[in-house]
Image (cartoon, grey):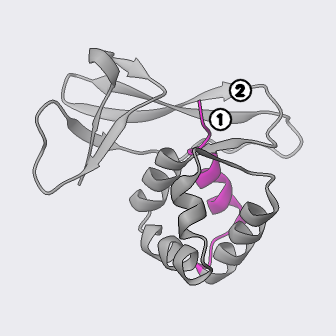
Amino acid sequence: MLYAQLPDGATESAIITATDAAEQPEGCLPLFYTDPPDVPAGRGYYWNARYRVVDGERVEQFWVRDESPPSPRSLSKRKLYNALKSRGLWDGVKQYLEAHDLWDDFALATTLDEDDPLIKEAIGTLEAALSLTDEDVERILAASVAD
């Protein structure tokens, strides 16, 4: 199960510390993800993920509309990992990175730029290999936008 802790006792934040653990770590609450709302084609906005403590018992992801252009986006590795892990896709992505000798690049990167040619190629290859739709990929990327 995934657990989360917001920074410095905040009740709402765009940043969390997530932990995958069998038992609830001290100071952490269960983490629940949601998919972003659909964006009608050509609307010129996207959704940013945020997190809030609900009833002092759990951390829920929610979405805030952002009027900024949707591309290029800088992706947070931590948010990307969390989005992939929660959908059961992380192992396949990690295998791809290792097989294509990209693991060191991934490990050293602070953020990933969506318009980087290697990232575009990896997204396209993984989309096909993991049978993801364009909507699946967009939900994962939208949940991974760096703050």
Secondary structure beneath dot 1 equals strand
At a point 67% along the width and 27% down the height, the residue shown is 65
Depicted 142 relative to depicted 29: above or below: below
Tell me where residue 60 sits by quadrant: top left
Secondary structure beneath dot 2 equals strand
Q: Please give the range of residues in magenta.
A: 130-147
At a point 57% along the width and 44% down the height, the residue shown is 110
User: What residue would you read off at disc 1?
Assistant: 47
Task: Please tell me how crowded label 2 is: few (under 14), some (14-19), or many (20+) other residues with Cα within 10 Å.
Answer: few
Task: Please tell me how crowded label 1 is: few (under 14), some (14-19), or many (20+) other residues with Cα within 10 Å.
Answer: many
Instruction: Where is residue 8? Give x, y as percent.
Output: 29, 17
Q: Which mark is residue 66?
A: 2
Q: Label 1 sits on what residue type?
A: Trp
Quadrant the C terminus occupies? top right
Q: Nearer the viewer, residue 81 or 140?
A: 81
Q: Nearer the viewer, residue 49 or 90?
A: 90
> Dots 2 and 1: beta carbons under 8 Å?
yes
